[in-house]
Image (cartoon, helix red, strand yellow):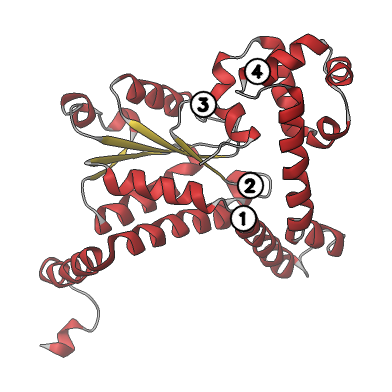
Amino acid sequence: MKANVKERIRTHFAGLTASQRMISRFVLEKPNLIAVHTAKKIGELTSTSESTVIRFSYALGYSGYGEMQEEIRRALLISDQLRGPIEKHQEASGERVTSENFVQQALETDIAYIQQALVHADVALFREAIRLIMSADKIVVVGFRWCHIPATWLANALNTLKGDTHLYQGAIGNADYLITEHSKKWLVIALSFPRHPAETIAFVKAAKTIGAQVLAITEGELSPISAKADVMLKVTTPQPAATNGMPTLFSILNALVEGVMAAGGDEIAHRLQQYDEISSTFYSFAGDEEDE
């Protein structure tokens, strides 16, 4: 899979100079200006220089500024064709949220962001994320603060479907299973959004030092866990993400779980059947008494 400019920035960001990082942010925030201006002009707009802009394109693996610019032009053309759900929602709903319209406003916003996620979903990245999950011997899911709830759901779902999945709970738990069995093929799935908990970042960095692979689910290429990730799934949510972002995030996680189920085929279907049968011997459920 050929990396686009955003993916190249994500994977190279940690090794860029301070000036090149400024240009990275400019590229991500204002790609339309890159598409129409020369390297000299971009140097002026970023308070750097023409040579720094050209070296930046080299640092990302391009043959020069022209190749990077042409890729951004193509990406913008595709992006313009895909624009829609969020923009249409924002244009249509100029109203302030009130006690009368809050249900409609909330649900329409959720629908717009989920539709936007579908429009911009990179299926190749989802497939790569599913490949990491399916090939891992063991999985650790980490997410703190408001990410703890979706992290718990994801860990439980993957443990049901695949097994050998742990939820890292920070200070109240421990990571001994990862440290003592580092010879295993571990995958760390990290969920983190602003403001990013330092413990999530530290855990991801530590996991990489012992050879674990990392799947990051976060807000974008410049997230502090993004550069360490083998694969990054970007989730754009309404703000503030902690209160309004759950529906979009859960939709992305659900798509990931559905992909795992599809990849596992009959094996996972059989595992789910066994799980249902065995769970009935451990837990009582409403209506079971009628079957006895």
Are dots 2 and 3 in contact, CB under 8 Å? no
The label nearer to you, 2 versus 1, is 1
Q: Does the rendering let one see residue 223?
A: no
Task: Say if mark 2 contacts mark 1, CB within 8 Å.
Answer: yes
Confirm or deny contact between disc 3 and disc 4 (CB under 8 A): no
Can you say whether 39 is above or below 80 in the image?
A: above
Q: Helix, strand or loop at disc 1? A: helix
Give, as a three-letter code, the residue at label 4. Tyr
- Residue 21: x, y in percent? 67, 18
- The residue carrying mark 4 is 58
> Which label lies toward us, 4 or 1?
4
Count of numbered marks: 4
Q: Which residue is mark 3?
A: 227
Give the alpha-carbon distance from disc 2 to disc 3, as whole Å: 18 Å
Separation of marks 3 and 4 at Cα, in angstroms: 18 Å
Label 4 or label 1, whichever comes before in sequence order: 4
Evaluate if marks 4 and 1 touch, with contact meaning CB atoms under 8 Å apart: no
> Residue 125's x, y, as percent?
49, 46
What amino acid type is highlighted by mark number 3? Ala
Q: Residues within 10 Å of mark 1 (few under 14, many from 20)?
A: many
Which numbered dot is residue 117? Answer: 1
Q: Where does the C terminus fall, quadrant-wise?
A: bottom left
Q: Residues within 10 Å of mark 4 (few under 14, many from 20)?
A: some
